[in-house]
Image (cartoon, rainbow, N blue to C red):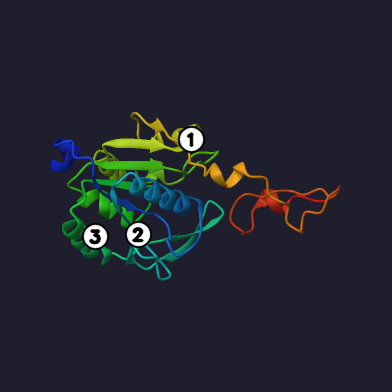
Amino acid sequence: MNPAPSSAMASGRARLRIGICAPYDLGRAGGVNTHIRDQARALQAVGHEVTVFGASSAPLPEGEIALAGALRLVIGQTETGLGLDPRSAARVKALLADRRFDILHVHEPLMPLLPWLVVHQATVPVVATFHAHRERGHRWYPLARPLLARLMRRVAVAIAVSEPARRTVEPHFPGPYEIVPNGIHLDRFRAPQRPPPEMPPGRRCLLYVGRLEPRPARDGVRPP
């Protein structure tokens, strides 16, 4: 059974206390962390009180809270930092009691361990966003389904950032998923910009969008 709406939501109050849980190391740059921080800024801009929290391997900006250190693992050919410290359960409990959120937004709620603890301890509605896409399906979802299905039953609204992301999770955890793509800062691209010196006229350039780490697609590119 999903947690009941908070008093703030039931009363229609415009200003909400929103907690956003990051699944990966907040101390490192990455697409999901960029999404989370942009989301927080957008919610704050319309008057909500937002707290971003998660695991981190480095000091965080003001307004973000580290509840655990980050252990680096390689998942899907990507080096990923996860909060796997079981002692963070007490820190999650203390944070939820102190901030008294009206709603919790947990990104990748099925990634261990910190997102699990947040969903499990939540007493307010949980929004979950799924980012991951696996061409051949998710390796761990079918194996851990008995455990993870209990967490999914606590999710009030499920979001996928794309149709491929939905296809990765929905076969294992059926239900309605709203497709909400990653946002784009349009103002950053409105004004023309000069190309960087590394892109001189007349030279072919390949734009790789992602973290600077070994990837088969990039490493396989050879000049003609």
Numbered tag placed on residue 92 in the rendering: 3
Q: What residue type is labelled 2?
A: Gly
Say what amino acid the circle numbered 1 marks: Ser
> What residue sits right under mark 2 in the picture?
54
Q: How far apart are marks 3 and 2 (CA)?
A: 9 Å
Give the residue furthest to the bottom.
59
The location of residue 130, given as percent across then percent down, is 41, 42
In 3D space, how far apart are the residues under numbered discs 3 and 1 (Cα atoms)?
29 Å
Q: Position of residue 32 (x, y in %)?
A: 46, 50
Q: In which quarter of the image is residue 145?
A: top left
Q: Is residue 46 above or below residue 72?
A: above
- Regarding mark 3 in the picture, which secondary structure is present there? helix
Which element is circle 1 on?
loop
First reached walking from the N terminus: tag 2 or tag 1: 2
Q: How many residues crowd mark 2 within 10 Å: few (<14), some (14–19), many (20+)?
A: many
Residue nearest the observer in this picture, 99 or 74: 99
Furthest residue in direction front, as rendered: 191
Task: Answer with left or right where residue 58 lies relative to residue 65.
Answer: right
Q: State the image coordinates of residue 82 (x, y, percent, origin top left).
A: 41, 60
Check disc 1 and report the residue beneath it.
162
Number of marks = 3
Do the CB atoms of the residues marked 3 and 1 lie less than 8 Å apart?
no
Q: Position of residue 5 (x, y in %)?
A: 17, 38
Q: Quick check: 120 left or right of 193? A: left
Q: Residue visible at 18% across and 40% down?
A: 13
Q: Residue at x 23, y 64 (%)?
A: 91
